[in-house]
């Protein structure tokens, strides 16, 4: 069973903001001759790397709700010039929308068990995916989605 990470998507007000950021990073990677991906750098290094890379994703919290995820491709640790160890989370280029799920603010990232993850929006039917993001957000807050 896969293990996932969850993190606040600081600076993004919508899924489109996240998509724009991911597209920009993917283009930079391709310009450097690399596979299209985005990289998120974090100070804390996950200890359960093997479980995370066995089908895990990084779930993004946008404006207080889990709204999207990206597949975890690789976790690379490195040490900066100041001697502080950090890691790069290499993420797939696709931003997959999820059913909105309320989440209180927290610092850093957290592990997320597979059974605690919201469903992918695409698996909920065309009617749900056709709803505007704000309406999905409100329906989730009311417990109707």
Image (tube, rainbow, N blue to C red):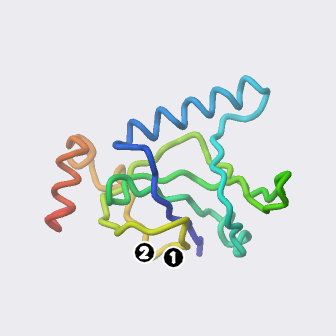
Quadrant containing the N terminus in the rendered view: bottom right
As helix, strand or loop, the secondary structure at mark 1 comes to: strand
* Residue at the image position 79 percent from the left and 59 percent from the top: 77
Query: Is the C-beta separation of discs 2 and 1 under 8 Å?
Result: yes
Residue hosting label 2: 116
> Residue 20, how many percent across, how many down?
47, 32
Left or right position of 21 against 34: left
Inter-mark Cα distance, 2 to 1: 5 Å
> Residue 89, how many percent across, how many down?
67, 54
Mark 2 is surrounded, within 10 Å at the Cα level, by few (under 14), some (14 to 19) or many (20 or more) other residues, namely few
Q: Is residue 96 above or below residue 36?
A: below
Picture quadrant where residue 38 is located: top right
> Residue 136, how many percent across, how many down?
21, 51
* Residue at the image position 48 percent from the left and 53 percent from the top: 69
Mark 1 is surrounded, within 10 Å at the Cα level, by few (under 14), some (14 to 19) or many (20 or more) other residues, namely some
Left or right position of 135 against 70: left
> Residue 74, how many percent across, how many down?
73, 55
* Residue at the image position 55 percent from the left and 66 percent from the top: 109
Left or right position of 42 against 107: right
Give the mark count: 2
As helix, strand or loop, the secondary structure at mark 2 comes to: helix
Closest to the observer: 122 or 6? 6
Q: Is residue 66 above or below residue 37?
A: below
Closest to the observer: 100 or 45? 45
* Residue at the image position 21 percent from the left and 41 percent from the top: 132
Picture quadrant where residue 42 is located: bottom right
Residue hosting label 1: 113
Picture quadrant where residue 131 is located: top left
The tag on residue 97 is none
């Amino acid at each position: 069973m896969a293990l996932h990470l969850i993190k606040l998507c600081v600076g993004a007000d919508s899924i489109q903001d996240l998509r724009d950021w991911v597209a920009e990073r993917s283009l930079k990677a391709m310009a450097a001759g690399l596979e299209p991906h985005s990289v998120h750098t974090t100070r804390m290094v996950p200890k359960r790397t093997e479980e995370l890379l066995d089908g895990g994703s990084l779930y993004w919290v946008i404006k207080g709700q889990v709204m999207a995820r990206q597949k975890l491709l690789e976790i690379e640790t490195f040490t900066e010039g100041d001697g502080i160890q950090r890691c790069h989370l290499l993420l797939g280029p696709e931003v997959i929308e999820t059913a909105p799920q309320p989440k209180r603010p927290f610092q850093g990232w957290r592990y997320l068990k597979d059974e605690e993850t919201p469903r992918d929006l695409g698996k909920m039917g065309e009617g749900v995916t056709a709803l505007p993001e704000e309406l999905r957000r409100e329906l989730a807050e009311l417990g109707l989605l």
